[in-house]
Amino acid sequence: MFGRTSVYHTRRVRETVLFLFPSMSGLDGRPLLFVLTGLVAGILTGHAHTPVPVSGGLFLALTACGMLAAPGRRLSVLLIPLCALAGSWLIAPWADLPGPVTDPPSAPRVLSGRIEHIRIQDRDLKCTLRDVRFKNGHGLAPPCTGIRLIIKKGCTLAVAEGMHLTTRCRLRPFTSFNNPGRFDYRRHMMQKGVAAWAVVKADDVTLSPAHPVHRWKSALHHARGRIEKALFAHAPTPRSGALLCALLTGNRAHVSPSLRDLFTHTGTAHLLAISGLHLGIVATVFYVLFTGMFSHWERPLIKGHTQMLAAAATLVPVLLYALLSGMAPSTQRALTAACLVMGALALHEEADLPTTLALAAIAILVSHPPALFAVSFQLSFAAVAAILASLAQLRTPRNPMTQRTFRQRVLLFIIPPCFASFGTAPLVWYHFGYASPIGLLANLILVPMTSFGVILPGLAGVLILPLCAPLAGLLFALAGYILEGTIQGASLFAAVPGGYLLLPRPGLATSLLVMILLFSLLLSTPHKRKGPLLIAIFCLLLLGQRATTAYMHRHHNPTLRVTVLDVGQGSAAVLAFPKGKRWLVDGGFAWPGRYDVGRFAVGPYLQAAQITTLDAVVLTHPESDHMGGLIHILKNFTVKTLFLGPRPGRGALWNRFDEAATRCGTRIVHLTDRSPPMDVEGVHITCLHPEALPKGFTGDGSVNNNSLVLRLAYGDHRFLLTGDIMEKAEDRLLADAGDALKADVMVVPHHGSRSSSTRAFLARVTPSIGVISAGQTNRYGLPHTEVMERYLRAGCALYRTDLHGAVTIESNGVSLSVSTFLAPPPPFPSSLTWTQP
């Protein structure tokens, strides 16, 4: 009786699972999907150091689901826990990555290694050294055996990939901006096997020929150089030449940031990375070509070997193209999938696409387990999975002798790219915080243009370049002109209102819910939609609950939060007012065309904090380490009001800032000590400095001394934001501001420099908490030791963004709390409390 009841309930559970997830009914004949499931689960739990009981429970739950979905494949289902254990073992060396490599400042090391991934930027040569060995014979601890090397003025060196390099340098650890929502650059580089970075001069480098095993890399590097030279020589414009290099040789170093942004805003950024699209075109064209050639060869035609020979021959140009492009991770994944498909064709087997996809993922993850966490890996397989779902939706029984109708051909052209866009949208939203609705249309037009109008003639030119350079030049020119048309088309799509949306970045749980919502609909079969619709409704309810909670937390939270961000050697602070308004004070530094803190630190924090509209942006003074990052903010976020000091800045960076402020149409207000106080949701804001024109400071240090100084009062607490004021400005405040300077919390002036924070000023302010914004191991030596000792002697607890990351001080008007992104902060007076985030 018990056995019958158990069987009955098991059958009911299985029917319920297949009702909700109809696509699981196809697992019976695809055991590799079980292998992939277990491998992914093992890598995730091993990487997260999940406790054994929790991991074991997860593995058993997955096994039970597999048993229910495929009762006839119980032995295959047992692969899930076995492969999960294998995945945990494979990721173990990467889960316990060694600490950052550091050297004493006086102890540079002599080291050598093999050169890879060469790029030239502003006369500097950037490369990766693999298999690094030190002079004493020791090397870096595996799996991270490489370093990133920057050779100043190295563009003149006769260097090639595969060559051996010896130099004397000081290894430096990779650093990240330690804010919520950050991109962990150190872990990213560690997962690529790169442990540290160094800077050397070209005169301090010794080069030697490549080892015979790696000479083919040098030959390919020289071939790429000749091809790129020809591409730039025949392309109609430098930008089309840069894009041709990206599409044909995989070198994206020449592509300007503005051009990358153009393709990003139109949802076609994947065109710039050599991936499945490009290799698929090459494989298809050469397979058709070789099939036609071998069909005229009588002997293999009689024996039925035509398809096998065509598939085997196709692998040669596919492999050469992959090697020529530099074998980027996306190219490696596409090459693996192409080899599997061609292998199936060679064996006269019809390639089962889900099994092929699973086998490609397994091969990549076994060889390099951290690939699972690469954004490109996730996007590639999500896109392919969505395309497979679209093909399942379009599959209809038909007579092999009949032709597809025009409607079927149109749907086959339109629906798979749309499904790919939908399938990758949650990942793009989670990782990058944007959506490109216009990409649905842009991909339908720009992808064929690029595929058949640029890549095919471009590759044909590459093949005949050694034989007939003039003809190759004509093909390169043709591809360049079509690429110019592609750029113009992308510009038109980018100008469509609402085509690109900057969004608040969701958490992991929200992203998973959106992913389940989309794929429950995409993978549902035409006649079994009730279950997936129930899943979709359930996900929508959960998403609505999370959105309501977030809204209530933002607009009904009776606290003032001041967060000083880690932006390196610069300054940026976010003010979160009690009823939802948000201000940004300064935005960190930016190097035009190279590195922008607004893009890589401030913007990601704002999106992670669910902020895309700023009620006000405050620029304390027009210096690069406070102003540069605001240009990105003004261009990409909605800014209602811009507060500036009375004096404009000078130079190219100020001109860019002024242009961005003018274009975004924000209201500009100039603040001085005569400006009326503002009341923002119960917070009283007063500008204490600088003086109105014509008064103010001139001469050396005048830009710093004319910084805006803002005082925030909320309940019993006072906050003082001081910009980069120096001793002269502090003396002026002591004379004119009086007791208005008193504050519980102060952002330390001028990053803790000895030019500020005089004893008299500190005695008047009497802060309990001081926050110093400074970069890690900055060249100025900030904050200065004597300044920190001055604060500590005054009984002020100090927090530093270079040590603690982002520092958040929260006040409800009665009590203060402090939290830091990294290490616990130092103790401060018992009247305050500290909470760890």
Image (cartoon, helix red, strand yellow):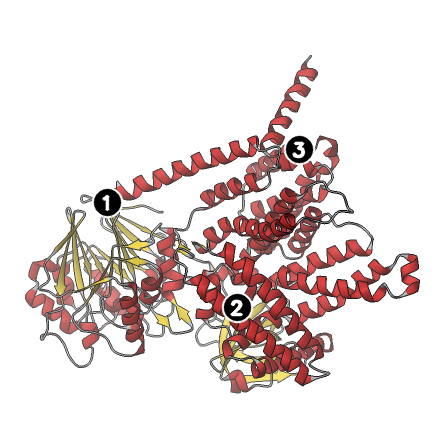
Residue 730 or 255: which is nearer the viewer?
255
Q: Measure how far apart labels 1 and 3 are at the Cα level.
A: 49 Å
Say which element carries label 3: helix
Residue at numbered disc 3: 69
Numbered tag placed on residue 208 in the rendering: none
Q: Quadrant of residue 762?
A: bottom left
Say which element carries label 1: loop
Pointer 3: residues within 10 angstroms few (<14), some, or many (20+)? many
Q: Residue furthest top?
A: 1
429 horizontally vs 92: left or right? left
Identify the mark nearer the N-term, 2 or 3: 3
Q: Quadrant of residue 710?
A: bottom left
Pointer 1: residues within 10 angstroms few (<14), some, or many (20+)? some
Identify the mark nearer the N-term, 1 or 3: 3
Amino acid under label 3? Ala
Residue at horizontal 38 percent and vertical 61 percent from the top: 601
Q: Measure how far apart labels 2 and 1 are at the Cα level.
A: 46 Å
Residue 326 or 532: which is nearer the viewer?
532
Residue at numbered disc 1: 579
Residue 579 or 272: which is nearer the viewer?
272
- Depth-wise, is mark 2 or mark 3 nearer the camera? 2
Residue at numbered disc 2: 486
